[in-house]
Image: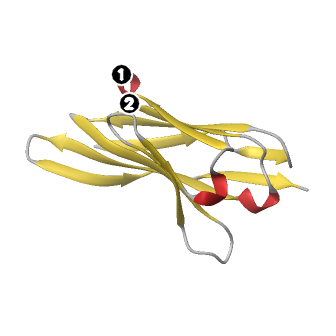
Amino acid sequence: QVQLAESGGGLVQAGGSLRLSCAASGNILSIDNMDWYRQAPGKQRELVATVYSGGGTKYVDSVKGRFTISRDNAKNTMFLQMSSLKPGDTAVYYCHANIQNNWHNWASYWGQGTQVTVSS
């Protein structure tokens, strides 16, 4: 059984910073890409940032220059450092990962989500 657990959400004023963490645990042989998604009320879930197993990264345009995604492969953990936060960043943030859980199977896993609220 594989689980993803997010932490680090909360309430912050516009211009502030937060750091989200996502820890993968369980029967893990390998992790491919890891991602952060977010979903604001009444909106579709959107991909915010991706970090690949080799360390390469990709961001949605709206967060470029403000958010930094990273991972610690030794600890199966991913981070999202968010700076210069805006009210428009308010959403539930979800981590996602493609994980090899046995020699013959890869599967997609999601965390339970963590709320980020940015006040103006």
Q: Is residue 20 left or right of residue 117?
A: left
Secondary structure under tag 2 reads loop
**Can see residue 90?**
no
- Image coordinates for residue 104, horizontal then vertical, percent: 8, 47
Task: Say whether marks 2 and 1 touch (CB < 8 Å).
Answer: yes
> Residue shown at 72%/38% (left/top)?
18
Which amino acid does the dot numbered 2 rest on?
A: Asn
Q: Quadrant of residue 1?
A: top left
Task: Report which residue position mark 2 lands on.
Answer: 76
Which amino acid does the dot numbered 1 rest on?
A: Ala
Q: Is residue 36 left or right of residue 63?
A: left
Q: Which disc number belongs to residue 17?
A: none
- Image coordinates for residue 117, horizontal then vertical, percent: 77, 54
Q: Quadrant of residue 52?
A: top left
Instruction: Pick out the residue farthest to the right.
Output: 120
> Residue shown at 69%/44% (left/top)?
66
Residue 45, compared with residue 67, is above or below; it is below
Query: Which residue occupies the foreground of this view, 84 or 77?
Result: 84
- Image coordinates for residue 55, horizontal then vertical, percent: 39, 34
Instruction: Pick out the residue farthest to the left.
Output: 104
Instruction: Pick out the residue farthest to the top.
Output: 74
Secondary structure under tag 1 reads helix
Q: What is the CA distance from the residue labelled 2 to the residue labelled 1? A: 6 Å
> Residue shown at 81%/53% (left/top)?
118
- Image coordinates for residue 90, horizontal then vertical, percent: 73, 58
Q: Is residue 83 left or right of residue 73?
A: right
Quadrant of the image containing the C terminus: bottom right
> Residue shown at 31%/35% (left/top)?
26
**Can see residue 80?**
yes
Task: Report which residue position mark 1 lands on.
Answer: 74
